Each structure stands twice: as C-alpha cells, then as structure tokens.
Amino acid sequence: MSDDVKAGVAAAKAALAGVPAEPGAPKQDAILTATGVRRAFGGLVAVDVAHIEVQRGAITALIGPNGAGKTTFFNLLTGFDRPSRGSWEFDGRRADRMRSYQVARSGMVRTFQLTKALSRMTVLENMLIGADRQRGERLWAAPFRWLWLKEEAQNAARALDLLERFKLADKRDHYAGELSGGQRKLLEMARALMLKPKMIMLDEPMAGVNPALKQSLLEHIKDLREEGMTVLFVEHDMDMVHEIADWVAVMAAGQLITEGTPDQISADQRVIDAYLGAHHDAAQH
C-alpha cells in the first residue's frame, strides 16, 4: 500500500472514529445527508429511511438482504426516481428536486447493477459521451468546428488516459457490446470519471464479474478514495466489504437498521437477524 493510499485510509478512519454504530449517526463532514426519504409503490413501501449521512472521502458500503430497497434508494438519490416524500442535500446543495443529469453535473455520479454501456458504439465513443457540456453537441455551435475542436481533443485525451488506467485502451475501437461483463463494469466506472465527480455511487460493482477482474475492480475503487472522491457502493459480498469499506450502512425492509465499521456490522445481532431471519432463530433452538 502506497503512502498516499495509507494517508487516505487513515483520514477516512479518523473522521469516522467515535461515530456511534447506530442508524442515522452524524458524521464529521457529511457530503450527503438525507432525511425522511420514503418511496411507496401503492401499498408497498420500498424505502423509508429516516436519516443517513455519508462521510466525505470515505468508502461506505450499503448492504442488506435482497429486496431491502438499496437500489431504489440509489435511484431516488440520483434523480432516476422520485420519492413519495423526503429531502436530501449533496455537498451543501439541496438535491432532491434535481433531475438525474443535474445530479451528475453537481458531482454525484452513479453506475448501475446492469451496465448501461451503449453496445453499438465503440468503447472510446462510450467514454466521450460521458463528458459534460460539450460545445460540439449544441446545435448553434456544431457548424463552427474551431469553437469546440480543442475541447474535443482534451476530452479524447482524458478518455484515453482513463481507458489506459482501466486496462481497456486496446479495446478503444471495439464495440462496447463485444466486452465481457467485467470489462463493461470497468468501462462504466471509467466513463463515470469523465465527469470528475466528487462522489461515485456503485450499484453492485462485482455482480457478474469473473474472479480475474474482481481484484482489479477492488483496486480501482480504493484508488478513488486516494484521489479524494467519496464512494458509496451496494454489495452482497462481505469479503469485499471487509476489504475496502471504511463504514457500512445496513438496510432491511426499506429502512436503515444500523451503521458501523465492517467488524461492528459483522457482529451486530440486528444484521444477523435481517439476513438470516427465521433460519437463524431456528438454528438457536
């Protein structure tokens, strides 16, 4: 582990030291704060989070059994769905009324459980559409190539740098649909970084990824923290959570039931009950 990575890990752990292992625990420097967020589909309440804060500069895992509401919560926070009620702030600005593209422009970018790579576009083209506010895309500016030529070159250079970093440079001219599931995950993460986000939200980044690429993805996520980004990710693999998460928030039946360090969460009876339920009770008798 490099000195920079060690410093990033130490800073995140220091910021979270002393934070109580309880749902909605206040953080020293929260980049995201959500209160009273509820989403109901008819009579089914999918999300009902009273309060949550996400520590700036840390890697936070959001875990819970299937159907806990994790992805729905992500969709709400990033403007891909609308809450029945509730409010949240990102980096000091109210974000609950923003559309998804406005959320991304504000610095909070997310990936999806099922990757959204545009399969009939090349890998490089997928990267370039991730760049924001491109002059060449404006109708009035399109004929005046000199206005956006330099910007286009800068975006292409950044895209190629990111593809090199994610070991996809040799795939730049391949169609995204030709990539493996793991490579598409890498592409989606790289594309998200085109916006230079303050916070990146990863929805099950390891789902469908073969073991050979898992470690690579883990290292990339750690690198995000080293670069000063905040990471919030949904994951079921507790080995991965223990390896990279500074903090863990646990959802069950739409609610945030507890928070804490990975070690605290692993020993928390509320978490054991949420995951195992009646099977766990039966094993005790």
Image: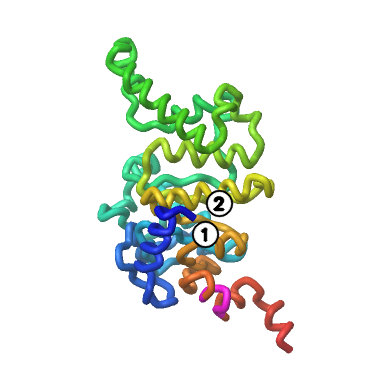
Q: Position of residue 59 (x, y in %)?
A: 45, 58
Q: Which residue is more in the foreground, 120 or 131?
A: 131
Answer yes or no: is residue 119 visible: yes
Q: Residue at x 45, y 56 (%)?
A: 232
Q: Residue at x 57, y 78 (%)?
A: 267
Magenta span: 264-268
Could you say whether the residue bearing mark 1 is in a helix, strand or loop?
helix
The image's mark for residue 283 is: none
Q: Residue at x 37, y 64 (%)?
A: 53
Residue bearing mark 2: 218
The image quarter in which residue 32 lies: bottom left
**Quarter holding the C terminus?**
bottom right
Say above or below: 150 vs 6: above
- Magenta segment: does it hold 266? yes
Say above or below: 45 vs 258: above
Q: Amino acid at mark 2?
A: Leu
